[in-house]
Amino acid sequence: MARMKVLLAAGLAVSVFGLAQAQVVPPAPPALPKPPYTDPQEAIVARQASYKAQGQMFGAMKKAIDAKQDPAPFAPDAAWMSQWGQLIPSMFPPGSETGHDTKALPAIWSDKAGFDKDAANFNAAAAKLAQVATTNDKAAFAEQYQAVGETCGACHRAYRARTQ
Ligand code: HEC
């Protein structure tokens, strides 16, 4: 009987572990950058780190959507994305046009109003994503995820150099 219990416990542990593996875990939101920067080159490093973190969060959300997972655990990531969106306009100070292999295009500075508008569109879409995530409505989350993705793409097309 005791042996049976051990076996059952082991089986349970395996299934819980298996479940934990299949579940997409939301990446922990990193500390937000703190503009303004005395050294504009530091702004490049900080913005690249934040964009990278955002890319990881957004990728994890996609996997979770594809796996039909509950969106609620992703609310903090979405909220972080929205907060980061508010900081984007201050992450491109004069003197950060080149260096650290930046993909920032000159249009960011020549068309600052357009760039800030794209950042604001993204910020609003991400704020809505965070709100939708808290309702745990999978379909609504997937739909708003698409809307956010369009705001990423709009800015990248106009203001980010292609990677290859
Ligand atoms: C308002 C403009 C804007 C928005 C909105 C935006 N991006 Fe970007 N993104 C950029 C720019 C500009 C860079 C290049 C930064 C640099 O190299 O200095 C970049 C870089 C990146 C990178 C590369 C980071 C690295 O250096 O490794 C990733 C990944 C990325 N963005 C993902 C996203 C995702 C995902 C979204 C939406 C959820 C998004 N971005 C929204 C403008 C934007």
Image: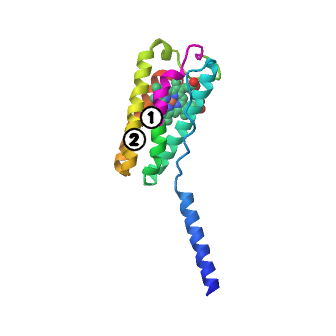
Labelled pair 1, 2 in contact (Cβ < 8 Å):
yes
Q: Is residue 79 above or below residue 34?
A: below
What residue type is disc 2 on?
Leu
Q: Which residue lies furthest to the bottom in this view?
A: 1
In three-dimensional space, the C-alpha distance between marks 1 and 2, rounded to whole angstroms, equals: 9 Å
Image location (x, y in percent) of residue 53: 56, 37
Residue 81 shows up from this direction: yes
75 w.r.t. 84: above or below: below
The secondary element bearing badge 2 is classed as: helix
* Tag of residue 129: 2
Q: Which mark is residue 12?
A: none
- The quarter of the rendered structure image containing the C terminus is top right
Picture residue at 46% right of the left edge, 47% below the top: 74
* Residue shown at the point (47%, 33%) measured from the top left: 83
User: Sequence order check: which comes first, mark 1 or mark 2?
Assistant: 1
Q: Does the magenta stretch include residue 117?
A: no
User: What amino acid type should be assigned to the residue bearing mark 1?
Assistant: Ser
Q: How crowded is mark 1: few (under 14 residues within 10 Å), some or many (20 or more)?
A: many
* Disc number placed over residue 82 in the picture, else none: 1
Q: Main secondary structure of the magenta part?
A: helix
Span colored in magenta = 81-97
Name the quadrant containing residue 41.
top right
